[in-house]
Image (cartoon, helix red, strand yellow):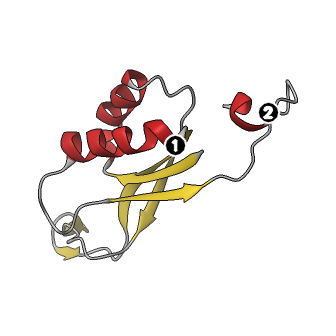
């Protein structure tokens, strides 16, 4: 099993959610997060437009899904095709191996816990 962590802009959440439904991914967890990196932040006006600043931390959505090894690469390829704009400041996908998983309600282990 693989854990996919996607850091994307908030406005692309619906597109990624539809893509995960297309691949029959049963569960998804998403968070509103802030972070910093190479991306350029937009200037924010404060005090009725008399002063502005550039925030250090930018808003993003983090999505976590656990999928079968055979499906992970297809999902990654589809996400890259759907939300990529070609900028080097784009968001990230992190992939981790999951050694074990358990469903607390059914006490199922391994792939049955998906």
Q: Which mark is residue 109?
A: none
Q: Is residue 44 visible?
A: yes
Image coordinates for residue 72, horizontal then vertical, percent: 44, 42
Quick one: which residue is furthest to the left in this view? 86
Q: Quadrant of the C terminus?
A: top right
Frontmost residue, 111 versus 28: 111
Image coordinates for residue 17, horizontal then vertical, percent: 39, 31
Vertically, is 48 above or below 75?
Answer: below
Q: Residues within 10 Å of mark 2 (few under 14, many from 20)?
A: few
Q: Relative to 81, is 17 on the left or the right?
A: right
Frontmost residue, 99 versus 22: 99
Q: Residues within 10 Å of mark 1 (few under 14, many from 20)?
A: few
Q: Which mark is residue 69?
A: 1
Residue drawn at x 19%, y 66% as measured from the top left: 42
Q: Relative to 59, is 69 on the left or the right?
A: right
Residue wearing tag 2:
103
Residue drawn at x 45%, y 36% as measured from the top left: 71
Q: Is residue 11 visible?
A: no
Residue drawn at x 30%, y 50% as measured from the top left: 9
Instruction: For mark 2, give the secondary structure.
Output: loop
What is the C-alpha distance between the residues marked 2 and 1? 19 Å
Image coordinates for residue 92, horizontal then vertical, percent: 35, 60
Quick one: which residue is furthest to the front in this view? 70
Comparing labels 2 and 1, the label whose residue is closer to the camera: 1
Vertically, is 101 above or below 97?
Answer: above
């Amino acid at each position: 099993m693989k854990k996919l962590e996607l850091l994307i802009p908030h406005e692309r959440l619906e597109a990624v959610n539809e893509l995960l439904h297309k691949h029959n991914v049963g569960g998804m967890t998403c968070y509103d997060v802030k972070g910093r990196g190479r991306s350029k932040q937009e200037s924010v006006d404060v005090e009725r437009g008399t002063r502005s600043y550039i925030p250090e931390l930018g808003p993003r959505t983090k999505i976590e899904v656990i999928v079968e090894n055979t499906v992970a690469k297809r999902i990654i390829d589809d996400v890259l095709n759907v939300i990529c704009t070609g900028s080097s400041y784009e968001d990230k996908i992190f992939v981790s191996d999951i050694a074990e998983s358990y469903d607390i309600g059914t006490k199922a282990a391994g792939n049955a816990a998906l």
